[in-house]
Image (spheres, rainbow, N blue to C red):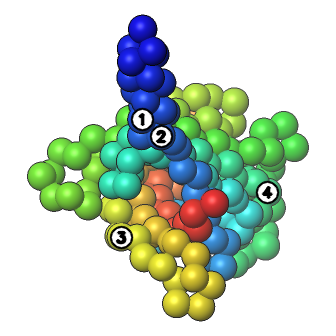
């Protein structure tokens, strides 16, 4: 009986230890969330969100079970043209007074390429009061110890195309501003 209890205790300890999750937080000095749209079919308009937080929770060193959570302050949008930024914040587009935050939470990460650092990340994107499942490309750029801070860091890039009309953002005429919005997030994460 004592031996069985001892083995059960060891089993529970090993199972608990192997299931430990690790939390990561984006380093704001080395992270950027950008987007690109096409204006009238022949020019690209670039912008970014200046205030956002991204966290990762994982129990695997290769991040294959990671959950990414993103929270973006939509009022921090910046296209370097004040009049356009004000319009994007208005009810014509994001309506930040009513919908101040855009969020994404991943539901799965799948390696579809056979390359150990490339994944498809799927999750729920919520903006303008609408939640839709989206799938994006994820590039795991590696993990290392920072030479200055001595903290463990990981790098990721997420890219993809979101259809703004799916979220009722902006006018329905895609000629003036493309429905397709190319997004790109480059981020360094610090192990907590």
- Earlier-in-chain disc, 2 versus 4: 2
Near-viewer residue (2 or 52): 2
Q: Position of residue 110 (x, y in %)?
A: 27, 41
Give the mark, 3 or 1, whose residue is nearer the N terminus. 1
Per the model, the C-alpha gap separating discs 1 and 2 is: 5 Å
Task: Give the residue pinned by disc 2.
Answer: 17
Is the residue marked by circle 2 packed among few (<14), some (14-19), or many (20+) residues within 10 Å?
few
Question: Where is residue 160 shown, x and y percent of the image?
Answer: 38, 54
Determine whether, in the image, residue 85 is placed left or right of residue 109: right
The reply to whether the C-beta atoms of the residues labelled 4 and 1 are less than 8 Å apart is no
Q: Secondary structure at mark 3?
A: strand
Determine which of the numbered discs, if any, sits on residue 142 in the image: 3
Q: What residue is disc 1 on?
A: 14
Q: Nearer the viewer, mark 3 or mark 1?
A: 1
* Residue, disc 4: 75
Structural distance between the alpha carbons of marks 3 and 2: 24 Å
**Label 1: few (<14), some (14–19) or many (≥20) C-alpha neighbours in 10 Å:** few
Tag 3 near tag 2, CB within 8 Å: no
Residue 47 appears in the rendering: no
């Amino acid at each position: 009986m004592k031996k069985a209890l001892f083995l059960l205790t060891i089993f529970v300890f090993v199972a608990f230890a192997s299931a430990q999750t690790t939390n990561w937080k984006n380093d704001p000095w080395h992270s950027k969330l950008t987007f690109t749209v096409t204006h009238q079919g022949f020019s690209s308009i670039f912008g970014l969100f200046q205030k956002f937080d991204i966290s990762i929770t994982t129990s695997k060193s290769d991040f294959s079970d990671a959950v990414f959570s993103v929270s973006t302050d939509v009022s921090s949008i910046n296209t370097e043209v004040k009049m356009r930024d004000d319009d994007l914040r208005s009810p014509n587009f994001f309506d930040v007074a009513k919908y101040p935050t855009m969020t994404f939470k991943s539901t799965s990460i799948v390696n579809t390429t056979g390359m150990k650092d490339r994944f498809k990340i799927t999750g729920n994107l919520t903006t303008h009061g609408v939640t839709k499942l989206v799938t994006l490309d994820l590039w795991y750029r590696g993990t290392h110890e920072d030479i200055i801070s001595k903290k463990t860091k990981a790098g990721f890039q997420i890219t993809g195309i979101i259809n703004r009309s799916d979220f009722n953002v902006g006018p329905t005429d895609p000629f003036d501003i493309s429905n397709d919005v190319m997004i790109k997030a480059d981020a360094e994460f610090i192990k907590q």
